[in-house]
Amino acid sequence: MFWDRFYELCLKKGTKPNPLAKELGISSGIITKWKSGSTPSGEMLTKIADYLDCSVDYLLGRENSEGDGSGYYINEETAKTAQEIFENRDLRMLFDAARDADPEDLKALHNMALALKRKERGNIDDTGC
């Protein structure tokens, strides 16, 4: 299922799997494995889905609709900000960092985000807690 969807989406983008793979830093040997039924790792699936503008679930055959990534964020301004972060190579690591973070690290990031939100609203907490 992955290979069929990957190939179909490459064609929609006006390319073929090997040139696209080269652009993403994927070897031709890996492409051959995919043709034989192998599936990319989670991180690579995400990278491919982002590039091809579809969901990982669509690539894996768990969804029938490609989706376009829209609708994830409820607030349009939040979606725009998230997209700006994602498009900035220096900041994109924030998305990847959260993916493999320990629960404690995610909680710390969550608390930091809440503190920033409070500061933005004028509820400044100078203690850092």
Image (tube, helix red, strand yellow):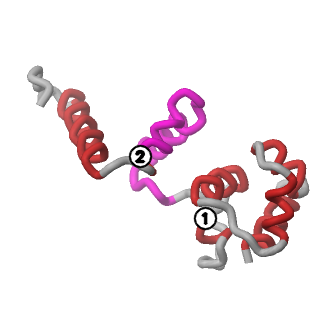
- Residue drawn 61% across the image and 63% down it: 55
Q: Quadrant of residue 33?
A: bottom right
Q: Main secondary structure of the magenta part?
A: helix
Q: Residues within 10 Å of mark 2 (few under 14, many from 20)?
A: few
Residue 3 vertical placement versus 31 (above, below): below
Disc 1 vs disc 2: Cβ atoms closer than 8 Å?
no
Quick one: 6 or 72, which is closer to the camera? Answer: 6
Judge whether residue 62 is colored magenta.
no
Q: Residues within 10 Å of mark 1 (few under 14, many from 20)?
A: many
Alpha carbons under labels 1 and 2: distance apart? 17 Å
Q: Secondary structure at mark 1?
A: helix
Left/right of residue 113 with respect to residue 24 in the rendered view: left
Q: Position of residue 96 (x, y in %)?
A: 50, 44
Q: Which quarter of the rendering shows the N terminus?
A: bottom right
From what the image shows, is residue 71 above or below residue 36?
Answer: above
Looking at this view, is 79 or 51 the one in front? Answer: 51
What span is in magenta?
A: 71-97
Is 97 on the left or on the right of 89, as rendered? left
**Which numbered disc covers residue 98?**
2
Tell me the residue at 90%/57% (across/down).
16
Name which residue lies at 18% across and 33% down: 118
On the image, the x and y values in percent for residue 43 come to 59, 53
Q: Earlier in the sequence, mark 1 or mark 2?
A: 1
Residue underneath mark 1: 56
Residue that appears at 45% across and 38% down: 94
Q: Is residue 83 magenta?
A: yes
Number of numbered discs present?
Answer: 2
Q: Amino acid at mark 1?
A: Val
Task: Find residue 69 and name its label.
Answer: none
Q: Amino acid at mark 2?
A: Ala
SS state under label 2: helix
Q: Which percent across, then down, holds residue 30?
A: 80, 58
